[in-house]
């Protein structure tokens, strides 16, 4: 049994897919999708450093809450973060519909990187793995982009798209981990859990 420091339904589904038993680590205060951290990139920060830093912050914040709450069983905590990058720019979650349109126009007809870091912390031990995938989008006309942005699926998604949803039709080629692009690379996740002596396929 582990704690999952995320409200993401995709991450819950992926953990369940490989038979990992978990409890969502959800606290009443705050409305963020994950344990509260400032996910703003630092000036000049590269995507690889960014995704590692944010994931480490999430795991540390979650573990501190476990320690500080009486009555909570101490179990390993799993945290993850996904970022999309193109030409050195970090393309995070769109702030509104026009921003989603802007991001999708940037991705149209290009190959971009998707980085997902996953980490497990238990007591003083911390382990992390990073999955990198290359995703090539078809060239999208404004009608397709506007329709997708209007669907609402782009929101709360790094890079303004969900590969497991309608945007799967935009993907000409994927090199890497499909589940990593979804938000939780199962190969790396299972290997991390084994390091902590936890059963994984």
Image (tube, rainbow, N blue to C red):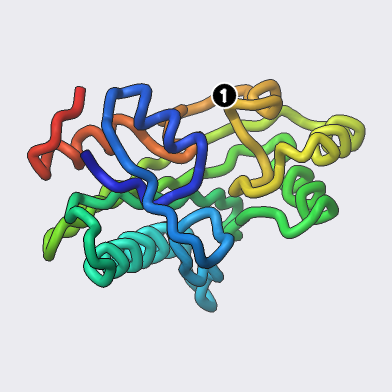
Compared to residue 196, the image places residue 135 above or below, namely: above
> Residue 83, how many percent across, how many down?
51, 51
Quadrant of the image containing the C terminus: top left
> Residue 14, how many percent across, how many down?
40, 29
Most distant residue in the right direction = 143
> Residue 150, how many percent across, how many down?
85, 39
Compared to residue 147, the image places residue 76 above or below, namely: below
> Residue 114, how many percent across, how many down?
50, 43
Mark 1 Cα-neighbour bin, 10 Å: few <14, some 14–19, many ≥20: few
Most distant residue in the front direction = 71
Q: Give the residue at mark 1.
A: 173
Residue located 11% across and 44% down the image: 196
Compared to residue 163, the image places residue 93 above or below, namely: below
Asked which quadrant contains residue 138, the reply is top right
Determine the secondary structure under disc 1: strand
Left or right of 148 in this view: 186:
left
């Amino acid at each position: 049994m582990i704690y999952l420091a995320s409200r993401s339904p995709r991450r819950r589904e992926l953990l369940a897919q490989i038979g990992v038993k978990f409890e969502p680590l959800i606290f009443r205060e705050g409305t963020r999708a994950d344990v509260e951290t400032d996910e703003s990139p630092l000036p000049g920060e590269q995507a690889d450093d960014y995704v590692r830093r944010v994931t480490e912050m999430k795991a540390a914040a979650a573990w501190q809450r476990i320690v500080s709450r009486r009555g909570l069983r101490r179990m390993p905590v799993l945290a993850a973060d996904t970022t999309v990058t193109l030409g050195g720019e970090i393309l995070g979650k769109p702030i509104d519909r026009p921003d989603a349109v802007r991001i999708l126009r940037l991705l149209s007809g290009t190959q971009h990187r998707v980085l997902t870091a996953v980490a497990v912390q238990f007591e003083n031990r911390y382990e992390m793995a990073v999955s990198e995938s290359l995703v090539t989008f078809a060239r999208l006309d404004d009608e397709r982009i506007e329709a997708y942005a209007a669907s609402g699926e782009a929101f709360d998604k790094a890079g303004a798209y969900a590969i497991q949803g309608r945007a799967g039709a935009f993907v000409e080629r994927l090199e890497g981990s499909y589940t990593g692009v979804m938000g939780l690379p199962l190969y790396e996740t299972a290997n991390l859990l084994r390091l902590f002596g936890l059963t994984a396929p």
